[in-house]
Each structure stands twice: as C-alpha cells, then as structure tokens.
C-alpha cells in the first residue's frame, strides 16, 4: 500500500469517529432535556429553575432598591416554581427583616399565583395588628419628641462651647492639656476619657467609689482636674454632683464656670434651675449666659420661659440664638409671639430695619426651629413667608420647611407643593419639603409625594415619607395601582405592603391578576 493511501484511510477513520461523537452528545442533550421535563411533569417543579430562583431571592435580600424590584419582576415571570419558594420563605419567617419580606410579597404578587391572596392577607393582618398596637403611643411620643434638626442645632451649640473651652485651656492654665483638649473636641463624648484625667491625682488606695472620688476632684487646686471632673459627672448624669457644681458655677474661674453650666444641662436636675437663671441673667460672660440658656432648655424649665424671652433681646447673637432654641425645647406657646416678632423685626419695613441682630441667619434659623418645636399654627403664615423669601438664607428656608412639617397644618400643603414644583427652588430646599409633606397626614400631601416616586432626585425620600404617613397614604396609593406608569404602580404596591393596611389586599390582587 502506498503511503498516500494510508493517510487517506487515517483521515476517513478520524472523520467517522467525529461524526459518531457529535451524534452521541446530541442524543444525550435530548435525553437530559426529556428527563428534566419528565421530572417537572411528575413533581410540578422544574429543577432547572432552582439555581436562578435562589440567585434572584439572594438579590431580593441584598441588592439595591432598583435591583430588588428587578429581581421581583424576574421571579414573577418564573410563575409557580418561584411562588413555591417565596411562600415557603414568607410563611416560615425566613425572609429576614421586614423590608425584605415586603419585596418577597411583591414578587409573589408578580407571579400571579392564586395562593398569593391568602398569604398577602395574613401578612398584612399581622402588620396592621402590630401597627395599631403601637400607633397611638408612637403618635403621642412624636408630639413631644425633639426633632432631629433641633437636636443637631443643640449639639452644634454644645460642640462650639466645648471647642471654646478646649482652646482656652492653655491661655488660662499654661500647662500641658493635650489629653483634656482631645476629650473636649472629640465627636463622641466619653465619660471614661474625662474620668481618667480627673482621677489622675487619686491614689490607688484612696477610699470611696469612683463617683465619690470625682466629687472630691471638684475641690482640686488644679483647674484641669476640676474641669475634667465636672465634665465626667455631667456625662455620667450624676445627681449627687448638682449642689457642688452649683457652687462652682457661682464662684470659680470663668472657664470652669462655663463647663459647670454645660454639665448641669447634661444632668438635667431641677435643683440647678435657680442658679442657671441667675447666671443667664447676670453673668458678664457671653458663653456662660448662652450655655445656661441651653441647659435650661434641656431641662424643659417652664419657670425660665419669661427670662428666656427677655434674652431674645440680648445684645449677643450667640445668647439670642441659644435663648430661642431653649424656648423651642421647653415648648411653651407664650413664646410664639415674641419669636415671630424676632423674625419680623429682622426684615426691613419702609426702608428701615428694626433689629440688625435679627437679620443674622444663626438667630433666624434658631427661631424658626423653635416655632416648629412649639407647633403652634399661629406661626404658619410667618414660616411660609420665610420659606418663600428668595432673599432669605437657604439654611433658614430649609428650617422653615421642616418647621411647617412639624406643625402639620394641612393648609400648607398647596404651598409646599408649589415650592416643590417650582423650577427656581434650590434643590436643598426641595429636599426638606419632601419629609415635611410626609409629616402632614393629608391626602393631597400623599398625592404630591406619589408623583415623585419615579423622580430620581426624590424617589427615596418620597418612599420614606409615604411609608411614614401610614393610613393617610393608603387610598391614594391604591388608586395608583391603576397607573399606566409601571414604576409608579410597582412602587405603590410595595408601599401598600409596607404600610400593612388590610384594605389594600383586594386592590393588589386585582392589579396583578391583570398582568
């Protein structure tokens, strides 16, 4: 046989082997597909979907909001196999935190499974029962709760005072103060940091517990030790320290007296009111007058209201601002007219200005926050004027929006909506309008927020605001289930699940049966 013939035979053999292999694997794929179909037909579950379903549920549990909505939609397209897994996780309480459970209920709705109605009804009944159990108390607590804006303003005052004390240490005592300065300027105030400095003079064998040693440190000849002891006792809220600190406030060096006024506000004892009132009225130190005012506000001292109102005419911006914040914390309505007068006297009338100090943003913002905390509708018109005034400082306008939300008068909804829809309104102010609308339990407020659910800039805050509105948002959200806009419809469905009102069950089922 010629060599050329051998190569032809080898080539033909290789070709035949390749053809047989391809045929075998092709038949194997058909067999595997047929086996999977047979398993699905026998068990009702397509095992080939198990991996994708697990992956999509993982996205429901860990993804961003948009990713979670996409995963819910994809699970919906998988029908019964996805519904089986979702129902198992929901009913076994294996869906994790509440929000994740909400996404799973949405995904179950998307599947169109007939069992969704019963599962949804039970879930919403549980939510509603829990909501009703705590709602009344929560609303009552919210009325007396200090707003986040006010808390931030008070913390800013406290931080400024601590920073002032820290910067004054070397001037007053001319000795190494690094450790105490660090403790004073720290973002998180630490009792232990102050206590370790205050107790540095105490011997290991010295009798008494730590509080007794700190009280003894108040008599130290070292100013740094006394200051650290005052701050430690203040952070610890130690009632036994009130009388000794009262005495320090009336007779020690100015720097120590500033820390004493601050600490008394931390402890919050009514026994300190008289001393703080005296210091607020007569101290020559601006920082002591300011700190005393804030401390009286923290105590909620109604006795101090007339004296705090007097301080609204104080010659120093810091004291005037502190008095306004303190009046807001006390919450006495007799302060409303004087506070309104501060805002009005800070605007020129007939070309004349009544008070230059009342034009200062620090004063105006403090007054606006105070009016919001007091919550009187008498202040509504004045706050609207502040919000709409384009010449007003933006921080003051933002505070006005928040204050209007805190007051909660439905009459301001139209104004807030116009501000939100005005292209000329700065974004930072619009951002404050959204949560303000959410605090006003009114149908029109809910409708304004629903429109913003597909607005990238405001969608997240609008969702939070609507969820917080609870029952007031239910009917407008139910109506939105008929929206042509799929984004709005999906967001409305998810919010109805989150709010947990039983009225939403039938509308939700009907909306997703039409898919």
Image (spheres, rainbow, N blue to C red):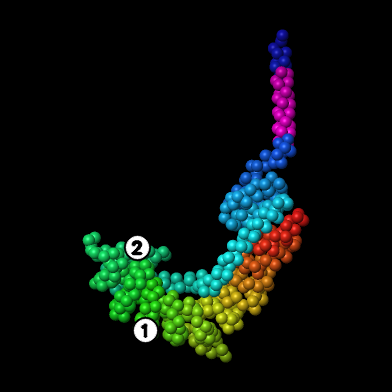
Residue found at x 59% / y 74%: 405
Per the picture, the main secondary structure of the magenta-coloured stretch is: helix
Secondary structure found at label 1: helix
Quarter placement of the N terminus? top right
Q: Magenta segment range?
A: 12-37
Q: Is residue 250 left or right of residue 390?
A: left
Residue 322 found in image quarter: bottom left
Is 160 above or below relative to 490? below
Local crowd at mark 2 within 10 Å, few (<14), some, or many (≥20)?
Answer: few
Q: Which residue is mark 1?
A: 278
Is 74 above or below relative to 131? above
Q: Which residue is mark 2?
A: 192
Is 170 above or below relative to 370? above
Percent position (x, y) of residue 190?
Answer: 38, 64
Residue found at x 68% / y 52%: 108
- Which residue is situated farthest in the top direction here? 1
Is residue 251 shown to the viewer in this render? yes
- Which residue is situated farthest in the right direction here? 514
Is residue 161 shown to the viewer in this render? no
Quarter placement of the C terminus? bottom right
In primary-sequence order, the first of circles 1 and 2 is 2
Percent position (x, y) of residue 201?
Answer: 24, 65
Percent position (x, y) of residue 313?
Answer: 45, 86
Is 514 above or below relative to 56? below
Residue found at x 60% / y 71%: 439
Secondary structure found at label 2: helix
Asked if the stretch drawn in magenta spans residue 326, the answer is: no
């Amino acid at each position: 046989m010629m060599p050329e013939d051998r190569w032809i035979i080898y080539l033909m053999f290789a070709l035949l082997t390749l053809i047989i292999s391809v045929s075998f694997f092709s038949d194997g794929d058909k067999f595997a597909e047929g086996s999977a179909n047979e398993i699905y037909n026998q068990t009702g579950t397509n095992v080939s979907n198990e991996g994708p379903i697990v992956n999509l549920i993982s996205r429901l549990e860990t993804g961003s909001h948009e990713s979670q909505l996409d995963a819910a939609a994809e699970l919906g397209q998988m029908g019964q196999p996805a519904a089986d897994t979702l129902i198992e996780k929901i009913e076994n309480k294996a869906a994790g935190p509440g929000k994740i459970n909400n996404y799973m209920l949405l995904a179950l709705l998307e599947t169109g499974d007939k069992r969704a109605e019963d599962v949804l009804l039970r879930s919403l009944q549980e939510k509603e029962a829990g909501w009703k159990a705590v709602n009344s108390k929560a609303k009552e607590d919210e009325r007396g709760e200090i707003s986040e804006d006010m808390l931030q303003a008070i913390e800013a005052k406290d931080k400024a005072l601590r920073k002032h004390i820290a910067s004054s240490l070397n001037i007053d005592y001319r000795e190494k103060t690094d450790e105490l300065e660090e403790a004073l300027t720290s973002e998180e105030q630490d009792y232990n940091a102050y206590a370790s400095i205050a107790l540095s003079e105490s011997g290991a064998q010295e009798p008494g517990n730590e509080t007794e040693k700190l009280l003894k440190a108040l008599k130290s000849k070292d100013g740094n030790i006394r200051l650290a002891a005052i701050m430690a006792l203040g952070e610890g809220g130690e009632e036994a320290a009130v009388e000794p600190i009262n005495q320090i406030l009336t007779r020690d060096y100015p720097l120590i007296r500033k820390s004493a006024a601050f600490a008394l506000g931390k402890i919050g004892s009514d026994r300190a009111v008289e001393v703080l009132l005296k210091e607020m009225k007569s101290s020559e130190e601006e920082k002591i007058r300011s700190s005393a005012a804030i401390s009286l506000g923290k105590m909620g001292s109604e006795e101090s209201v007339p004296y705090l109102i007097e301080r609204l005419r104080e010659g120093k911006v810091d004291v005037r601002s502190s008095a306004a914040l303190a009046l807001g914390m006390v919450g006495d309505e007799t302060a409303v007219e004087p506070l309104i007068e501060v805002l009005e006297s800070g605007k020129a009338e007939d070309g004349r200005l009544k008070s230059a100090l009342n034009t200062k943003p620090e004063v105006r913002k403090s007054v606006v926050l105070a009016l919001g905390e007091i919550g009187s509708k008498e202040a509504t018109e004045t706050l609207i004027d502040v919000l709409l005034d384009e010449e007003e400082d933006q921080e003051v306008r933002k505070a006005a929006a928040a204050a209007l939300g805190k007051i909660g008068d439905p009459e301001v909804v139209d104004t807030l909506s116009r501000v939100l829809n005005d292209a000329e309104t700065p974004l930072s102010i619009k951002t404050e309008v959204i949560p303000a609308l959410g605090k006003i339990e009114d149908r029109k407020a809910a409708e304004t927020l629903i429109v913003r659910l597909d607005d990238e800039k405001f969608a997240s805050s609008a969702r939070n605001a609507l969820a917080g509105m609870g029952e007031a948002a239910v009917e407008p959200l139910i109506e939105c289930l008929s929206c042509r806009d799929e984004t709005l419809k999906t967001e409305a469905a998810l919010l109805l699940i989150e709010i947990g009102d039983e009225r939403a069950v039938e509308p939700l089922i009907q909306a997703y049966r039409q898919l």
